[in-house]
């Protein structure tokens, strides 16, 4: 069977990404991807448009969301194959349950980062999987981490793989052509359903690929969007 690659964690300007739906689809096709997942922070406002454009141009698109859990950790959870937005600000466990309640797949992005905020830490993750099984976890990602934490994550996965689901690789793309497809998940097949079944059966393989350096002016602008504009929009209830 054909092996394709997916970047299942991409953002648009609907949250803190720097590209619109059309630019994201164009960049994904240029990177040779068969599939992307649109996972904007706390909104699905652009997901349907990306899916429509993808269908027109031959790119499979999974509609999803990167959900922020309750304060203070505000850990992030990816929901794939969602039909509607998941409420933000719930507990980690309740967020995973809400994803499952609508038939979606729950995946932990960028775990064990150096920061407490946004990233699921080992003790939190261990408590979660005692109650809820996950469909996947990013074991290769672009967010900052350390070699020691990466080794600890690999050991944690080997110990708890039956509850953590598939190994996933994703770029956490915010910059379109500059970073989409830099980190991917290989799977057998090509369609969204093929990808879903590969994840459910833990038949995925994270891979790192070469990428382009992102200009510092874009990095700075994205940080303003992510750290200032996005929290303000969330506070004002403007995201969903």
Image (cartoon, rainbow, N blue to C red):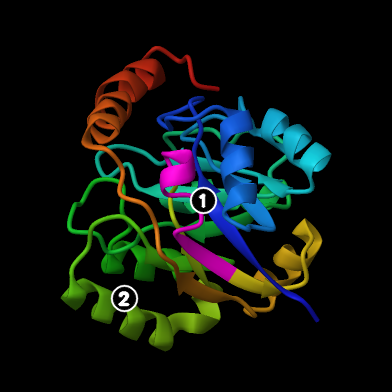
Q: Is residue 145 left or right of residue 138?
A: left
| Residue at x-position 69% and y-position 49% | 101
Are dots 2 and 1 in contact, CB under 8 Å?
no
| Residue at x-position 56% and y-position 68% | 185
| 58 w.r.t. 44: above or below | below
Q: Quadrant of the N terminus?
A: bottom right
Q: Nearer the viewer, residue 189 or 154?
A: 189
* Distance from Cα at disc 2 to Cα at disc 1: 19 Å
Q: In this orientation, does residue 133 appear?
A: no
Q: Is residue 193 left or right of residue 221?
A: right
Q: Dot 1 corresponds to which residue?
A: 9
For residue 176: magenta? Answer: yes
Query: Where is residue 49 shown, x and y percent of the image?
Result: 70, 28
Query: Where is residue 70 shown, x and y percent of the image?
Result: 36, 38
Query: Where is residue 119 shown, x and y percent of the image?
Result: 31, 53
Q: In this orientation, does residue 107 appear?
A: yes
| Residue at x-position 34% and y-position 62% | 111
Give the label, 2 or 1, closer to the camera. Answer: 1
Density class for disc 1 (Cα within 10 Å; few <14, some 14-19, many ≥20) is many
Q: Nearer the viewer, residue 107 or 203?
A: 203
| 182 w.r.t. 83: above or below | below
Query: Where is residue 227 shown, x and y percent of the image?
Result: 25, 29
Q: Quadrant of residue 51?
A: top right
Q: Nearer the viewer, residue 217 or 130?
A: 217
For residue 205: magenta? Answer: no
Q: Quadrant of the C terminus?
A: top right
Disc 2 element:
helix
Density class for disc 2 (Cα within 10 Å; few <14, some 14-19, many ≥20) is some
Q: Dot 2 corresponds to which residue?
A: 153
Q: Which residues are magenta?
A: 174-185
């Amino acid at each position: 069977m054909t092996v394709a690659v997916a970047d299942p964690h991409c953002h648009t300007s609907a949250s803190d990404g720097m590209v619109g739906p059309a630019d994201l689809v164009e960049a994904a096709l240029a990177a040779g991807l068969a599939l992307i997942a649109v996972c904007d922070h706390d909104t699905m406002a652009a997901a349907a448009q990306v899916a429509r454009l993808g269908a027109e141009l031959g790119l499979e698109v999974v509609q999803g969301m990167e959900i922020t859990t309750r304060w203070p950790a505000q850990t992030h959870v990816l929901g794939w194959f969602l039909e509607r937005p998941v409420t933000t600000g719930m507990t980690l466990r309740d967020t995973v349950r809400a994803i499952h309640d609508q038939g979606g797949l729950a995946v932990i992005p960028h775990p064990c980062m150096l920061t407490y905020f946004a990233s699921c830490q080992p003790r939190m993750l261990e408590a979660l999987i005692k109650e809820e099984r996950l469909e996947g976890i990013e074991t290769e990602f672009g967010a900052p981490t350390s070699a020691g934490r990466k080794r600890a994550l690999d050991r944690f996965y080997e110990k708890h793989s039956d509850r953590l689901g598939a190994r996933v690789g994703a770029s956490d793309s915010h910059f379109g052509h500059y970073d989409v497809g830099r980190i991917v998940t290989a799977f057998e097949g090509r369609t969204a359903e093929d990808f879903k079944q590969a994840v459910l059966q833990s038949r995925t393989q994270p891979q790192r690929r070469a990428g382009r350096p992102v200009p510092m002016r874009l990095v700075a602008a994205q940080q303003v969007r992510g750290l200032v504009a996005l929290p303000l929009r969330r506070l004002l209830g403007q995201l969903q």
